[in-house]
Image (cartoon, grey):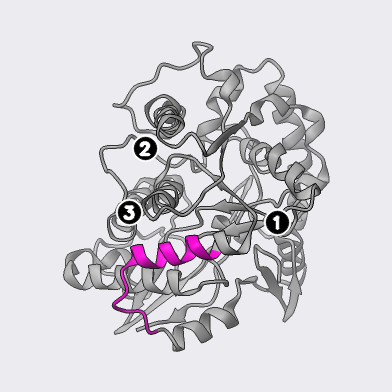
Amino acid sequence: MSLNGYYIVNGLPIKNKLQAIFEASRTKTNVQWNYFDDIFVEATKNFNKHDVPLKELYRIRAQQLRDSYDYLILNYSGGSDSHNILMTFLEYGIKLDHLYIQWPEQLMNKGIYTPNAIDRTNANFHSEWDLVIKKDLEWLSKSHPEIKIEIGDWSKTVTEKFYKDDIFVNDVSNLPSIARAQKQNTFSPTEGNLALQGKKVASIFGVDKPCIVKKGDNWFFYFIDTACMAQPNPDNPNGTEYFYWTPSFPDIAIAQAHAMKKYFELNNSKTYLVRALSERVRPPIPADYTSNTEASPIVYNTKNYENWYHEFSQLAEISKLVCYPYWDFNRFQADKPFAILTGFKMGTRGWDNILTKIPKFDRVQQAWEYHWKSYLNDIDMKFMRNNDTLNVCKTNWHLFA
């Protein structure tokens, strides 16, 4: 199975999401996503690590990676997912060789934005460089000089020639925006060079926080395809590793789900955040509430966007509290740059604001829009979040309690 799972339409497996959407639209049916379902179902049945601390499971996973590869690269953003991984390696003295940071570094000191810790909207996303990432790297270079630090500046490759059909029709499980597509195709030169020399190299991603839902008295966890978006390095196609959501050690995802369940049982007033939509009574669901599956509390129209985002943010903070023991809530972190229905050109997100300062950005955006519009006639709008973003696809729910 592909690292990013596969889609099922009319019982047939399809690797690429866009192709799956085309087929489901043509045959007027639905799309299911499979992410190692058989492995997680079996692991859930046999799970026996209820009393093992998450930190210990993280240690086991880090050591598993160390024992499996010659060279370990952590894709680091300074956010809670990757920071927890970094601190796990450091605390337990497990050798980590390399940090790879994808960031538009050339634009950071151009006066395009002013760093500030007050504005946490996604328009201020780039302040994370000054307030978090840069500080982390300076600290790491002094306290752990043995760890190589490499920055991949994806803004240097922004060109309209980049946007061709093969960027959209590939095995990345969510349709990339302009910035996301650039990032997903900016690879560590070190990773590629070592792999070509015959080294076994792991490129580790912090995927991801747990997704849980309660229906009746039963608890379930599931996975979403938009989290699994890593594009393997062409020179190291088998080296990509998700740290948390992994069939190589499914106990982590299951243990995180149990930890979240325990939290909500102790904080019952917040359980509505994970209630199945058919059972939700608090807060009331607006009359024009829309969702493509019962499992998802996602609202895709502008009127209700703030309501959904507020709940999403609460769940993210709870996940950090419950699952990431190394996280410092005083660290600056901007809101996630999700697309809203209005205010952005096609293909752009909140974090693309800085790229608009590149003179050729308009041509880049026009190229992206040209290709994307060519697909729209073949897509049923029920599969769309808005006119340039596909809906999330989810796995089956896995009963765990």
Q: Which residues are magenta?
A: 48-64
Which SS does the magenta portion mostly show?
Answer: helix
**Real-space CA distance between mark 2 and mark 3, rounded to the nearest whole angstrom:** 12 Å
Q: Position of residue 357 (x, y in %)?
A: 60, 17
Which residue type does callout 3 highlight?
A: Lys
- The answer to whether any part of residue 158 appears in the image is no
In this figure, which residue is indicated by the disc labeled 3? 320
Question: Does residue 290 sit above or below 147 in this rendering?
Answer: below
**Between tags 2 and 1, which lies in front?**
1
Contact between labelled residues 3 and 1, with CB atoms less than 8 Å apart: no
Question: Can I make out residue 51 in this image?
Answer: yes
Q: What residue sits right under mark 2 in the picture?
A: 333
Could you tell me which residue is drawn at 47 percent across and 58 percent down?
Answer: 208
Compared with residue 7, is residue 328 higher up or lower down, i.e. above or below?
Answer: above
- CB under 8 Å between discs 2 and 3: no
Q: Quadrant of residue 7?
A: bottom right
